[in-house]
Amino acid sequence: MAVTIPKNITNGKDLIVISKEEYEALMTLKKIYEFQPTSSQKRALTAARKRKKKGEALTFSEFKRHLDLTD
């Protein structure tokens, strides 16, 4: 049996069909792995990006050398 999906429903985009069980499993994974930063984390990230833009950030290698954590 073939099912024809009208193009106006998909707006010309690809369509993927999965079972309800597979969809629910995917939604469970999304809830588990999705990161939602707090307001303070967002502020810290913004500040870090500004420092990096100014050239005030260290690379990981520089950070290790600074702490004298060579391999």
Image (tube, grey):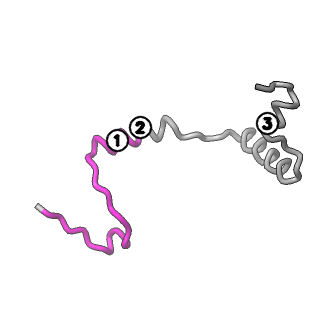
Q: Where is residue 13 in the image (x, y as percent from the top left)?
A: 38, 68
Q: State the residue lying farthest toward the left.
A: 1
* Mark pair 1, 2: CA separation: 6 Å
Q: Is residue 18 above or below residue 33?
A: below
Q: Where is residue 11 in the image (x, y as percent from the top left)?
A: 38, 72
Q: Position of residue 17 (x, y in %)?
A: 28, 55
Q: State the residue lying farthest toward the bottom.
A: 8
Give the labeled residue for mark 1. Answer: 24
The image quarter in which residue 45 lies: top right
Of the numbered discs in the image, which one, if any, rests on residue 61? 3
* Mark pair 3, 2: CA separation: 37 Å
Give the labeled residue for mark 2. Answer: 28
Q: Do the residues labelled 1 and 2 touch (CB within 8 Å)?
A: yes
* Mark pair 1, 3: CA separation: 42 Å
Residue 23 is a magenta residue: yes
60 left or right of 28?
A: right
Magenta stretch, residue numbers: 2-28
* Secondary structure state at the residue bearing disc 2: helix
